Image (cartoon, grey):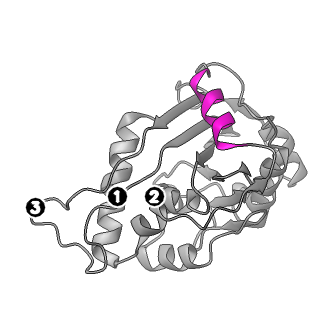
Amino acid sequence: MTADRTAAGRRRLLTVAGTAGILLGTAACSSSGGVTGTGSLSYDHVRSTAQGLAGTGPCPFGLDLPAALKAAGIDRPVTPGSKGGPAVTTDLGNGRPAEPWPSGFSAPPSMASVPATPPTAWVTCAYTVGSAPIQIDLLAVPENGVAINMMLPYIQKAGGIGVDQLTRFAEAQPTAGQTKLTPGAESVGVARVAANGKGDIALTLSQSSSDAGPEQALTGEALRKATERLAAQLRP
């Protein structure tokens, strides 16, 4: 994920929080407690791996999109990369402390300041499936239960969903080991992955938005199954 996407994501987060009163930021900086998990990947491992990834390398952590699509009954040729861009990109966020709202910004009454956010490790693997651009996004954070909340601005944009739909999805988001689809066109699969130790990991499989709408073969239950399969593939 590029610096531009990071900045845009923060702007979208403020917009969603300010206009809908969704407490995304509060959820993003609050831990679900000190419970540690026993999954395959840890936040530290995702971050250290992301630091050494090259743009032309294979998708890390054992992720095999062709196998996942085949298991879901999607028969399409798969090519790494899309529109000449790199096949793998990363973004390592150092976190941000709580800070005052921008001057003149109408903030929700329950949010006294722009909430703090924890450090992040975000890995994106881009592909062309048939003629459709599709990507895997993996986000790891060192706080429990917050990864999907931090991805909500991206999930909203990728899924082409409105604020009300985003609110409903946020309120019933996947728990560890679950995979769900965004409402509407069902064009984003979202899985929460059990982390090893303290932290939280989320994985999404989505199409890039286009005026023509999503490729239907890569939506709905087939997409959910492919996302679920990808989450099951993850390994150090």
Q: Earlier in the sequence, mark 2 or mark 1?
A: 1
| Residue 45 is one of the magenta-drawn residues | yes
Q: Residue at x 39, y 43 (%)?
A: 6
Residue kind at label 1, given as amino acid type: Arg
Mark 3 or mark 2: which comes first in sequence? Answer: 3
Q: Kindly identify which residue carries mark 1.
A: 12
Task: Give me the C-alpha separation between circle 3 and circle 1.
Answer: 17 Å
Q: Residues within 10 Å of mark 3 (few under 14, many from 20)?
A: few
Neighbor class of circle 1 (other Cα within 10 Å; few <14, some 14-19, many 20+) is: some
Q: Are marks 2 and 1 in contact (CB under 8 Å)?
A: yes
Any part of residue 1 in sight: no
For the C terminus, the quadrant is top right
- Disc with the residue nearer the chain's start (3 vs 1): 1
Left or right for 139, reference 94: right
From the image, state whether disc 3 or disc 2 is nearer to you: 3
CA–CA distance between discs 3 and 2?
26 Å
Quickly name the residue at label 2: 157
Badge 3 is on which residue?
103
Residue 36 image-quadrant placement: bottom right
Tell me the magenta residue range. 42-52
> Which residue is farthest front?
34
What amino acid is found at the position of numbered circle 3 in the picture?
A: Ser
**Residue 230 % position (x, y):** 79, 48
